[in-house]
Each structure stands twice: as structure tokens, then as C-alpha cells.
Amino acid sequence: MKKIALYLLALTFTCTAALAAGGLDGFLSNLNVQARADLSGFAGRLSAQFGVPGVQVSATLGTVREPADAFMIYQLGQMTHQPYQRVLQTYQANRGKGWGVIAKSLGIKPGSAEFHALKRGDFALTGRPGRTWEQRDDYGKGKGRGKGHNK
């Protein structure tokens, strides 16, 4: 019986650790792997999805630490309705502080649907134009503590 309990405890710990490794960090890590395997394809998908000319995508990729950082610059620009150049400036000024700090600097409020999507890494690099993160089937269906909580 003790062996079963220890096995279940180890399994629970393993599952919890796997889930904790997900979220934004897991998404960005996977994106970096994809980008390093085919950087020109990655740049092409960024260009198509965010409507940024390939030359500008290449320039952005040349100024960021990791390829996934370029994705986040365009994604946050889309989410905040700001030009990617402004997001890039904010990224450079706050490098190393994390995407949450950068998002807050751009006006994304903690607790908002956008901030929760950021923390979950609830994004996709599809390479298809015109589909924003809000148009996902599960957008807005989180467990937020919005109005009406504890009434």
C-alpha cells in the first residue's frame, strides 16, 4: 500500500511539474525550437500572420535575444493595438524583466483577459493572416474573477 501511495505522489509531482513548465515559457521554448529548425520559414509565418514585411521581420529577428521574442513583440503589438516598433522599444528598455512587465508597460492590465492569455501562453503561430488571438474558440472562457464574484 505504501508503494502505491508513493507512486501516486510521484505521479502527481511529475504531472504538476509538467504543467508548471507549460504556460508562456513552454510556448516560447517550443517556438524557439521551431525557429531554429527553420528560421526562414519562421520569419515567413511571422510576416504572414502579423502583416509585417519580411525585411522588417528579419530586422526584428536581428535585434532580439531569441526568435520567440520577435513573435511576442508582434503579438503584444496586435493585442495592444500599438505598432511593433513601440513594443520593440519597450522590450529593449525592459529586457530581462519578463513579458509581464513589458505587457504592463504597454497597458495590459493584470487580471485582464489579455494578461491571462499571456501567462498561459495562449497563442499560436499559424502563419495565417487576419486571425487574432481574441478570435480563438476559447477566448474569454477563463476562470477569471470578474464582476459578480462573491456577490
Image (cartoon, rainbow, N blue to C red):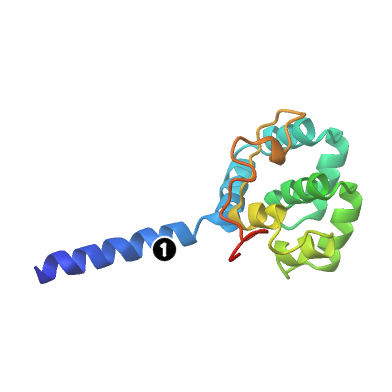
Q: Residues within 10 Å of mark 1 (few under 14, many from 20)?
A: few
Of 99 and 119, which appears nearest the observer? 119
Compared across the picture, whether 127 is left or right of 144 comes to right
Q: Residue furthest front?
A: 151
Percent position of residue 124, x then y: 63, 40
Q: Residue at x 82, y 54 (%)?
A: 63
Quadrant position of residue 52: top right
Q: Residue furthest left?
A: 1
Residue 91 vertical placement versus 36 (above, below)? below
Percent position of residue 11, x then y: 28, 61
Q: Quadrant of the N terminus?
A: bottom left
**Residue occupied by mark 1:** 17
Of 115 and 88, which appears nearest the observer? 115
Of 120 and 97, which appears nearest the observer? 120
Residue 63 vertical placement versus 56 (above, below)? below
From this viewpoint, is residue 66 visible? no
Percent position of residue 84, x then y: 87, 48
Percent position of residue 110, x then y: 72, 64
Q: How many marks?
A: 1
Query: What is the secondary structure assignment of the residue under circle 1?
Result: helix
From this viewpoint, is residue 50 visible? yes
Residue 44 vertical placement versus 63 (above, below)? above
Under mark 1, the amino acid is Ala
Q: Quadrant of the C terminus?
A: bottom right
Quadrant position of residue 43: top right
Of 42 and 146, which appears nearest the observer? 146
Q: Residue at x 62, y 48 (%)?
A: 32
Residue 12 vertical placement versus 53 (above, below)? below
